[in-house]
Image (spheres, rainbow, N blue to C red):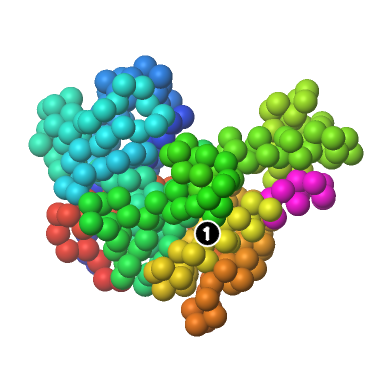
Amino acid sequence: MSTPRLSIGIDLGGTSIKAGLISDIDGLIDERSVITEAESGHVRVLDQISDLVSGFLRTDDAIEGIGIGFPGAVNWERTVASKPVNIADWEHVHMPEAINSRLGTSLPVLVENDANAAALGSARFGAGRDFDSFIMITLGTGVGGAIIYQKKIFRGATGAAGEIGHMTIDFEGPLARSGVAGAIEAYLGQRFLSRHARYQLLNEKDSLVHGMAGPDLLDISPKILYEAALQGDAGSTEILAWAGNKLGIVLGSAINLLDIRKVVVGGGLSAAGDFILASARKSMVDFTTPALRDGLEIVQESSGNEAGMLGAGYLVFEQTGEVGSD
């Protein structure tokens, strides 16, 4: 039996930073996390990442490198991370220099868009493992997208391909954070979906969310909608189905463009499962041209929040040498 190769995978989020010790054979071996402290700025966040990495380096000297899933733009070389929307005063950071200077090491450090990292994690260890090619959607604070083609991330011309969350389904629709009118993120991003749900349910006094989301439903969230739907709440069930319908519409457009017919859905909102995915499956077919409808499939990511760490760590194996057979 071959000796496992080891790396460190980082999932950098606006709320928490998760770090995992990753094996090319067994996947996630160990995990640690800290609060991001995003409002404290990029220097503090880089210190947090380095502290997590240092904890793993003290226990194992066979680690080949560090991969980081980053919520922003990344250059083609996977070295410079730029302008995340949720971390204060972060402009352009050369990640190998920033991390190695703090650790006193010279390890390979690779950074990739967080949705791309999650897609690679799914392709190697999660629900995407059964597919040669698939579209990845992550539903969370925003809507992330990625394309896996023949088991590798399709990066486009500059490394920024796959931004399905910024594809529009209504040119007169609400503005997403990107400024794109009617982008799918303007419907399914956590803040947007919560606001829509609040407006829809404020006057439905028999809805269970009134006992769960505080006065005037100010604390409403996708998680509350899911919990209410599980208890049979009709209003919450209808809103989640509405969200799934929107998701299916944009997926139909993506499939028409790419001729990739498998879709993996991850992120926090994906926990709602068929409350969202059932309507997404129907509308995806409706908005896909008939010639491309054979083999259409949507599945829920099985590795949960681990996918980002797994994919970030796997970047190292791809970069530093041959990896295991598919």
Vertical arrangement, residue 80 with respect to residue 112, above or below: above
The region drawn magenta spans 229-241
Q: Quadrant of residue 297?
A: bottom right
- Name the residue rendered at 58%, 61% in the picture: 248
Q: Is residue 304 visible?
A: no
- Name the residue rendered at 58%, 46% in the picture: 173
Magenta highlight: main SS: helix
Vertical arrangement, residue 168 with respect to residue 211, above or below: below
Q: Nearer the viewer, residue 24 or 306?
A: 306
Residue type at mark 1 is: Val
Q: Nearer the viewer, residue 93 or 83?
A: 83
- Name the residue rendered at 29%, 26% in the picture: 90
Q: Is residue 105 left or right of residue 6?
A: left
Q: Position of residue 192 (x, y in %)?
A: 60, 38
Q: Quadrant of residue 84?
A: top left
Q: Is residue 35 left or right of residue 242?
A: left
| Quarter of the picture holding the N terminus | bottom left
Q: Is residue 315 left or right of residue 17?
A: left
- The secondary element bearing badge 1 is classed as helix
The residue under label 1 is: 250
Q: Position of residue 94 (x, y in %)?
A: 17, 33
Q: Position of residue 10 (x, y in %)?
A: 33, 40
> Which residue is outermost to the left?
106
Q: Is residue 244 left or right of residue 9?
A: right
Crowd tier of the residue under label 1, counting other residues whose Cα lies within 10 Å: few below 14, some 14–19, many 20 or above? many
Residue 299 in magenta stretch:
no
- Name the residue rendered at 10%, 36% in the picture: 106
Q: Position of residue 326 (x, y in %)?
A: 30, 71
